[in-house]
Image: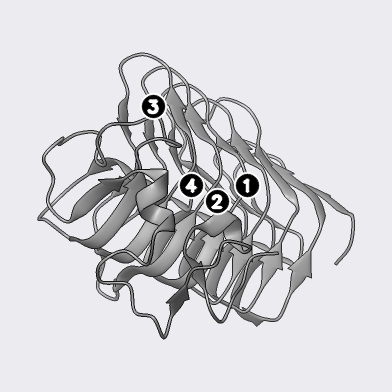
Amino acid sequence: LANVNVMGGRNSFVGALAGNLIAVNDVDVSGKVSGGPGSSVGGIAGYAGHIFTSHTSAAVSGIGDSTPDTSFAGGLAGVAEQIQDSFSTAQVSGGVSWYIGGVAGQITADVERSYATGTVMTGDNGVSGGLVGQQIAGQFSIGISNCYATGFVSGGAGSTVGGFVGLNDAAVRDSNSIGAVASGSGNAVGGLIGNDEGPSDLTDTYFDTETSGQSHGVGNNTAYPGVTGLTTAQFQAGLPTGFDPSVWSESATVNDGFPYLLTLPPR
């Protein structure tokens, strides 16, 4: 789908391919998609059960103040259960109190072998993450594994902002973020995760202390286990501990020397 222009109003499911779908494979979207308060807005679908081997560069916008509604926007989907082997280069933005993420505003099951490179920006009292806005723990929750985010992530006053996940309540493994992270006053802000809830659930996760502009990985707990800050030189000197070389690789000429997925090289 090339150069789409899809718009939805309040309380809508809005996507270039479908508002609400069960599963999709091998879809590529460019253009722009937008929706109003109370909506789930995504470059491919507003709500998606499963997204596989798909990509979007469509600009995704959550428009208006969503208070007191709950609103989600993401490069691939506003809300998704599962995303695998997919990526987004989309710019994603949201107004006041929106939940937004590079690939999804909210994830309820898992994200595997995927990445996001676009800018992610939310307004005051929102939640934003370079890959996922909010990851929630549920009956079928597996978590995020073998993923990365490189885009600039920001939020307004009172927002929760993470270079990788904004608000997290499930496992994150073998993943990293290198994008700059910025926010207004009174925020929970971290190089990797803005606010991590529940038990310790991070394993072999990393963020760049230089490019992110953040000194700690988790905004609400500066001593959170399982997350490590690396300098850019350390990132580029070889795969971080725990990264499987059959999944990840590094090259000075690919992804600016940072780790990338062998089955999904950046483009």
Q: In the rendered view, does 40 fall on the left or right side of 63?
A: left
* Amino acid type shown at disc 3: Ser
* Between discs 1 and 2, the one toward the N terminus: 2
Marks 1/3: CA–CA distance: 19 Å
The quadrant holding residue 172 is bottom left
Q: Is residue 262 above or below residue 231?
A: below
Residue farthest top in this picture? 185
Residue occupying the point 13% across, 45% down: 224
Residue, disc 4: 130
* Amino acid type shown at disc 2: Gly
Task: Mark 1 and mark 2 in contact? Answer it, CB < 8 Å.
Answer: yes
Q: Nearer the viewer, mark 1 or mark 2?
A: 1
Residue, disc 1: 118
Dot 1 surroundings within 10 Å: few (below 14), some, or many (20 or more)? many
Residue, disc 3: 159
* Between discs 3 and 2, the one toward the N terminus: 2
Task: Mark 3 and mark 4 in contact? Answer it, CB < 8 Å.
Answer: no
* Amino acid type shown at disc 1: Gly
For the rendered model, the colour scheme is one colour
Task: Mark 4 and mark 1 in contact? Answer it, CB < 8 Å.
Answer: no
Task: Mark 1 and mark 3 in contact? Answer it, CB < 8 Å.
Answer: no
* Amino acid type shown at disc 4: Gly
Instruction: Name the secondary structure under disc 4.
Output: loop
Q: In the rendered view, does 15 fall on the left or right side of 209?
A: right
* Between discs 4 and 2, the one toward the N terminus: 2
Residue, disc 2: 102
Q: Nearer the viewer, mark 3 or mark 4?
A: 4
